Amino acid sequence: MKAPSHRLLSVLKRTTAMHHGTKTVTETAATTPGRRHEHRASGPESPVGKRRGVLLFVLLIAQLMVILDITAVNIALPSLAKDLRLTGSDISWTITSYSLIFGSLLLFGGRAADLLGRRRRFLTGLAVFTASSFASAMAGTAAALFAARAGQGLGAALLSPAALAIIMTAFQGNQRAKALAAWGAVGGAGAAIGVLVGGVLTEFGDWRMIFYVNLPVAAALAIAAIKIVPSDPQKPRWRGLDLRGALLATTSLGAIVFAITQGETAGWTSLQTLLFGLGGLAGLSAFAALERRTDAPLLRIERLADRAVGGGLFLMLAAAGSIFGLFLLSSLYLQNVLGMGPLATGLAFIPLAVAAGIGAHAAGHIVSRHGVRGPLTSAFVVTAGGMTLLAHVGETGSYVRDVLPGMLIAGAGLGVAVVSVSIAILTGAREEETGMISGLNSTGHEIGGTIGIAIFSTIAAGTGILAGPQAASGISHAFIAAAVLASVASLVALAILPRARHFVPKLRLNPLATPVH
């Protein structure tokens, strides 16, 4: 009976920075000085233990707040778009302006936490996130909302890696394993909680409540953090921050996303689309060249030549894009076509969250036996099947008949895919670069979601109608595109990723590669 629990504990220790973090167990263990004396209470929990419990609670609530501001907004999109008069693919910028900045600055945020101080960066990120949440709630125009959401993304990119780094330094041994398991659970459950919170707040209040609710939560977090988060022992070290690389990557990705979202309106061969699209690609090339010449780069570009890392990054972009797109398109169909309210829509997403959770749980066991190539190929095939079913949505459809089956199938496939891809990327990491590679994994998740939303919302808005029964046609076309993307991803996984006989031994030698959800 002890073997399963021992295995579970080992899995917990082999946890992830895939949920928006940059530090890993081995990296931190090598850099964190040990305590000379550690007294454990034999009776009730010691004051130190209680203090650490409060610290963990504070950090988990902060991470949950960051995650909720992605999925909760999905549910509020129809009412938000009506209030601010958003049309066509512009509606997608409500989400992409947040996830784009968040994802592209995650590597920078992790590096800043290491050099400038974890507590300082946590409080700075919390302050930026809170101020931007207030600005989002007060926004009277689309441009004001998009700018405020970008500010939220900046705050989240500073706050989330710093919170994980604090956990890694404050907890040791089995306590660290439990803390990281809780961190992973928050990341996995955040999507389901987000759609419910978004549904309740929008149904009984207003879409602005999604942002207003952050204010008292953030104020309580700030007071608690000042009292309980350990002070930074060193002064800020500004040398080594790759600010140029961070700005170049962010502006380049933003140009590409802008080209995609405006392509239908401006024309795919227009000067605007070509200028921003090609300019963004040129900017990414310049970023790669800059990183190769930087002493302390955000990303070592040459590591992308590893099939597990480079191929895994592409597959993470595809998987995350599919997940974000699935949430967005399903929300638009349920509310704009079927006329479901925000709360009913939030409840309708629970089966999707359960299916994805089951898939994620099964992925670790499957990969440990069969490697990543076979499971990923199969997972994307299953995802393509679910998206194909969803492509049959029509003007007079129903949730149970037209949405639920495809949602369950696609959700299960994507649950397997995301975890398997993360394992593939992290297994390719050397011990001294696990922080960077795990940060790349998290970045791929956010950027993939950003690009996915840009593409699928543009296709869905191709008919010019996103509300009413006629919107079903564009949404159906977007689901077809999602099925094609998943099919392409399955072929890439089959062609690029290493075989099980080459991968499984590496997985056993690199226990950091198994993420916790």
Image (cartoon, grey):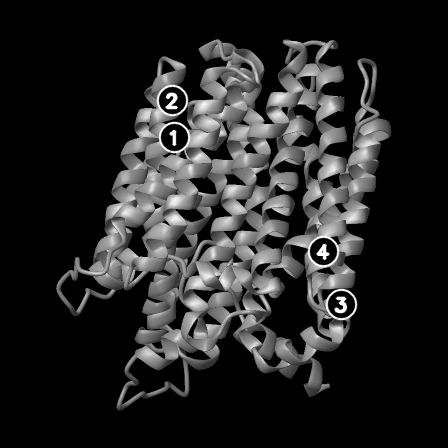
Q: Quick one: label 2 or label 4, which is nearer the N terminus?
A: 2
Residue 104's spot in the image, x, y percent?
41, 44
Judge from the rendering whether residue 386 lies leftward or rightward of residue 32; answer left or right.
Answer: right
Q: Is residue 227 left or right of residue 457?
A: left
Name the image quarter holding residue 164: bottom left
What amino acid is found at the position of numbered circle 2 in the picture?
A: Leu
**Label 2 to label 4: alpha-carbon separation:** 38 Å
Whether label 2 touches label 1, CB < 8 Å: yes
Question: x%, y% of residue 275?
Answer: 44, 24
For the point 59% across and 82% down, which residue is it? 509
Provide the residue designation for mark 3: 366
- Tag of residue 145: 2
Residue 123 position, x and y percent, is 25, 50
Quarter of the image where the N terminus is located: bottom right
Residue 284, given in percent of the width and then of the height, sits at 42, 43
- The image quarter containing residue 508 is bottom right
**Residue 97, visible in the rendered structure:** no
